[in-house]
Amino acid sequence: MTPPTPLSTLKTIFGYDAFRGTQEEIIGHLIDGGDALVLMPTGGGKSLCFQIPGLLREGTAVVISPLIALMQDQVEALKQNGVRAGGLNSALSQEAALEMEGAMVRGELDLVYVAPERLMTPRFQDILSRTPLSLFAIDEAHCVSQWGHDFRPEYMQLAILAERFPDVPRIALTATADPIVREEMAQRLHLTTAKRFVSSFDRPNIRYRVVVKNNPKKQLENFIEREHSDDSGIVYCLSRKKVEATATWLSERGYRALPYHAGLPPAVRATNQRRFITEDQVIIVATIAFGMGIDKPDVRFVAHLDLPKNLESYYQETGRAGRDGLPADAWMAYSLGDAVFLRQMLDTSEGDETFKRIQHQKLNAMLGFCEITGCRRQALLAYFGETHKSTCNNCDTCLEPVATWEGTTEAQKALSCVYRTGQRFGAGHLIEVLLGKRTDKVEGFGHDKVSTFGIGTDHSDKEWRSVYRQLVASGIVSVTPQTGGFYLNEKSMPVLKGQEQVRFRKDPTQPRGGKKSSARARTSRLMDEVCVAPGTRALWDALKSYRSETAKEAGVPPYLVFNDATLADLIEKMPLDDIELLAVSGIGQQKLSAYGDEILVIIDAHLKEIV
Ligand code: ADP
Ligand code: ZN
């Protein structure tokens, strides 16, 4: 028999036909004993980069992973593929841990996942010294950076591995796009001379969209109803209260929506997280407390009902959608209120001038992203240092180009109204003045006498909101931290004096509300794209319920039985025998013997049905 190669291992164990991007190069480099620093986006396929060398090199591969959930998920996925893998963490009983350590020393495991704090104990170091080692993999390596948001002090000690085990190759992996964090990683892990593999951070399967908020809950409901009523997704809100209210709202409308925030009892949080991972069609409504360590590959959408603080957070949060590479959505609703709120927050925050300046730049980039009229993906990637010449055709501005209008006069009216009313009111009052509304408040302040009273009747309330939103977003007007009132700044003057022109984006009109029906039609953008042939929706359902039942029996998440990519490929290829099953993405030897027969029965029944 010919010895296994990376490609044959990819095929027989993992069931995939070809390597992606830099995977093959990285695997070859490690097999040859080299060190590697891998920068690859979420969903890029980092795990295979160390798993395959771990299987092909002599000895046990030790994988350092910061979170038990991540660890268990990967170990379970490997076991499902028939790989000898184990996870050493605090969730394990002492006996089980002892047994696993024994298996390591005897060379019975190909991959062992460990938490960083355990790795550095004298006891484990002793075990390591007696175990034949194939490599060290440091996953989520950005946890070593004090600059990043996931700093883990235990990661600092991992540099010792280089000294103690100079002959064992090391690979550090991360999906972080921040260059400062990347440098710090290389330094602290003693990997400055390691070969670097940098992939594009583009996530082409994610469709970016930003809509202007008017009735956010309803807009969210419409979005889910039209595109994802059969899917799993995450909805992010800023406050706990809003998390609860949104989860309740969606539940009342028949969705399986569960809240998640730091104020819930730990048991409730754990249950909700587990249900999200192990059940189909669960929507988790969460604060940003949720996400780290969620490796669920089939999250079909991430929705934001509030604006993240910066594009780094936005990219990280939206990146949780579509790890499996299939079509997914990043949808966000955004308003004048969000822009005002974030500007206020920033001005009241602690920190020195440099810190504040950086935060301001980041917020400007975030708001600029919302108001952009060009391709959103190009702008996002440019922010992370990647130039992409062509537009993406998979973001809202590419799919429905945004019109702009010459708004210098309107900007001048809006700014001048800020000035005439004393630079202390917010948009609501200013718009009433512009529209010439004689409300108690307007008259009470004598603003029916100012020169800007009633000069804006050629535009609607909504249009003026859009004007003020864009002025706040671009910093042409400032926001008083305490009151939210607007005041002029150095950027307002050139506009007021007519030295600078202003163009506004024309807010697209919202699609009409969904039709009311008690029995909602199930929709999934993915399902709609995959199930084009007649009758295939029924097959989709049958395979999905087989997957759920099997997963339930085995006590694993459904995507570990087979994921959506496999589901889609099954429908596309309609395999009729074992050979054809093996050609399906994600089906290797182990899954063929575990599920093959039953899948064939389901497909057979389907074919009989349609002829
Ligand atoms: P990351 O850790 O970079 O976020 P994963 O290693 O979890 O990504 O991989 C994301 C998904 O892509 C997984 O479902 C994985 O099985 C799949 N995958 C990885 N490499 C390939 C490949 N060469 N062909 C097909 N699917 C792949
Ligand atoms: Zn685009």
Image (spheres, rainbow, N blue to C red):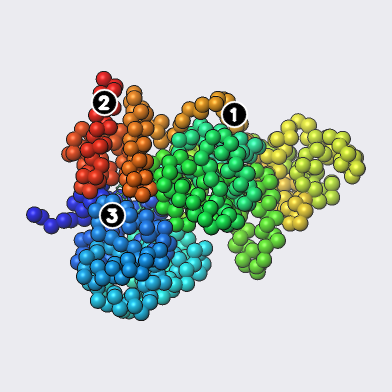
Going from N to C along the chain, the mark reached first, 2 or 1, is 1
Q: Give 313 or 152, whichever is nearer the viewer.
A: 152
Q: Secondary structure at mark 3?
A: helix
Residue 300 placement: quadrant: top left
- Amino acid marked by disc 1: Gly
Residue 253 placement: quadrant: top right
Indicate the position of residue 208 as horizontal and vertical percent values.
50, 42
Checking the image for residue 513, the label placed there is 1
Residue at 28% x, 54% y is 79
Q: Nearer the viewer, mark 3 or mark 1?
A: 3
Indicate the position of residue 225 as horizontal and vertical percent values.
52, 33
Q: Quadrant of the C terminus?
A: top left
Q: Which residue is mark 3?
A: 79
In the rendered image, the residue lying farthest to the left is: 1
Q: Is residue 46 depicted above or below 337 in this figure? A: below
Circle 1 packing at 10 Å, graded few (<14), some (14-19), many (20+), is: few
Tell me the distance, in whole angstroms, between the alpha carbons under discs 2 and 1.
38 Å
Residue at 88% x, 39% y is 440
Q: Give 523 or 487, whichever is nearer the viewer.
A: 523
Going from N to C along the chain, the mark reached first, 3 or 2, is 3
Tell me the distance, in whole angstroms, between the alpha carbons under discs 3 and 2.
32 Å
Q: Which residue is mark 2?
A: 607
- Amino acid marked by disc 2: Leu
Can residue 376 be seen here? The reply is no
- Amino acid marked by disc 3: Lys
Indicate the position of residue 408 as horizontal and vertical percent values.
70, 40
Residue at 46% x, 30% y is 522
Q: Is residue 89 left or right of residue 167?
A: right
